[in-house]
Amino acid sequence: MSTVFQKQSLNLPSDFYSRLFEELSRADLRAILAKARMRIVSRNEVLQHEDEPGSHFSMLVSGFADLSKAAPGGKRVFLRWISPGDVFGLAALQPQSHPFLTTVTAGSEASVMVWNRDAIQPLLDRFPKLRENVCSVANGYLSLLADLLMSRISETAQQRLARIIAESAQTIGRSAPNGIELDLTNEQLSEMADVSRFTSSRFVSEWQRRGILKKTRGKLIVQSPEQLQLLG
Amino acid sequence: MSTVFQKQSLNLPSDFYSRLFEELSRADLRAILAKARMRIVSRNEVLQHEDEPGSHFSMLVSGFADLSKAAPGGKRVFLRWISPGDVFGLAALQPQSHPFLTTVTAGSEASVMVWNRDAIQPLLDRFPKLRENVCSVANGYLSLLADLLMSRISETAQQRLARIIAESAQTIGRSAPNGIELDLTNEQLSEMADVSRFTSSRFVSEWQRRGILKKTRGKLIVQSPEQLQLLG
DNA sequence: CGGAATCTTGAGCGGCTTCAAAACCTGTGG
DNA sequence: CCACAGGTTTTGAAGCCGCTCAAGATTCCG
């Protein structure tokens, strides 16, 4: 639960990329970053909570996080992984106050750049390109939700599970000698794919028999991402 | 298939309301409307087609339409009804060209106000309030898709069907002496709720027995919207 | 009246979930 | 080094929701 603020040291790695910063000059960027604060969070810390007023806009700098939403019935629905460079908290950009639509939770130790409502909004007027980029991100989220809805409607439990594993491998996987490693339990997989723990176990076992992946307690090693993609 | 363009006569009924026009002065509004053209379409005409380049931005003026999206497997997924004052085609607002995410089809004879990409984009810069309103609409669509996803995940076939009927009654229903009338077949209902034709028939029959609604060939009369809401 | 579309009802089935029970780690503390 | 406790994974059996298929009844219209 250690939350550390650093006022200075907003220097990003030189290879850092974000859609948000596209086509912005070095000077403009400096002005934008000057209005942010850096926040260091630990695993499972909540970066924004749905239904609460959208008071801040954020960009993940390091680590990873998950974007999810509560469904009636106490269930959490996984939407996607947040990787470095991804932004969230679009609600804070609206002139009138809107609540966050989703919850973002750190999946590892992570650092996040945070702009307060009052800090980010003037920047949108000052840098039209920034506003463009933000709109482009919003469009991306629309597209994401539309795709999730379609997938939910037309995919089977097996396909959803395969896709979740493939996506997770791409975004939060560590490459290891024998494949891509993921620190996920069967239960976590099942929640993300919205499948029962047992269904998850059964399919994972089957894929293990086929040599597509390998599962040990709390860990998963994807050996053949290609074959997984075929199932999704 | 008669498509008529009228260059003049962009006079809207005095009681016409659209979220898009909120807090815009009469003069600004005139300037905005001046850049639009009015289009009259007949039932089943397609107003925008997903995956095609987002070349125009639209507002429904009269009649109604449906917003839908194709799912892999040839299925059409119903998203919501479009009523007078609703806008769509946000893809046309992006500086870089983006395809439409959804398809909009007229559900009756309808009139639509249409702005070309090149016409609407300068207006966003000229009238900041217009841009705000557009962002607010975009946020509404995000919220809509999120809700649809949640409902799809946690609702049963029965609940989806009940909700679809309740929503349709509110947006495209005619009030009649014995309830709210809808021109919908069981098959249409089942497609909208993404339920088999048979499941739809079974529940509708049951609700008819309970006196909640009345179904005749090609028509549906909702007698007790309140009881329907309870099921959703 | 005949034909086409719509609606109804029953029977069977498949995909997933739920439940029960057991096997299997892995870290902890004696 | 062993035993134990907690979380994790496996497997089978039963059940349920909603779909598919078949077949008939109803309504509408030319």
Image (cartoon, coloured by chain):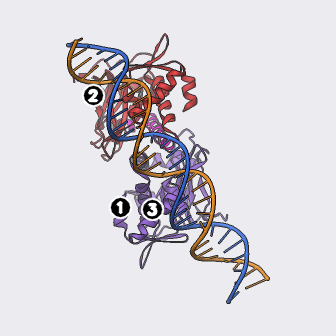
Chain colours: A purple, B red, C orange, D blue
Residue A131 visible within the image = yes
Residue B53 location, x and y as percent?
27, 42
Residue B66 location, x and y as percent?
37, 30
Select label 2 or label 3 by which is in front. 3
Magenta segment includes B148: yes
Q: Amino acid at mark 2?
A: Glu
Reply above or below: B77 against A13. Answer: above
Q: Are marks 2 and 3 on the same chain?
A: no
Q: CA distance from mark 2 to mark 3?
A: 45 Å
Residue at the image point whose x is 40% and y is 25% from the top: B29
Residue A41 location, x and y as percent?
61, 63
Residue at the image point whose x is 42% and y is 22% from the top: B172
Q: Amino acid at mark 3?
A: Phe
Reply above or below: A229 against B182. Answer: below
Q: For the residues labelled 1 and 3, say whether their Cβ atoms are less than 8 Å apart.
A: no
Residue at the image point whose x is 37% and y is 29% from the top: B188
Magenta segment includes A124: no
Magenta segment's dominant SS is helix
Mark 2 lies on a secondary structure that is: loop
Q: CA distance from mark 1 to mark 3?
A: 14 Å
Q: Which residues are magenta?
A: B123-152
Q: Which residue is mark 1?
A: A229
Q: CA distance from mark 2 to mark 1?
A: 37 Å
Q: For the residues labelled 2 and 3, say whether their Cβ atoms are less than 8 Å apart.
A: no
Q: Quadrant of residue B230?
A: top right
Numbered tag placed on residue B45 in the rendering: 2
Residue at the image point whose x is 34% and y is 66% from the top: A226
Reply above or below: D14 against B57. Answer: below
Q: Earlier in the sequence, mark 1 or mark 3?
A: 3
Numbered tag placed on residue A203 in the rendering: 3
Numbered marks: total: 3
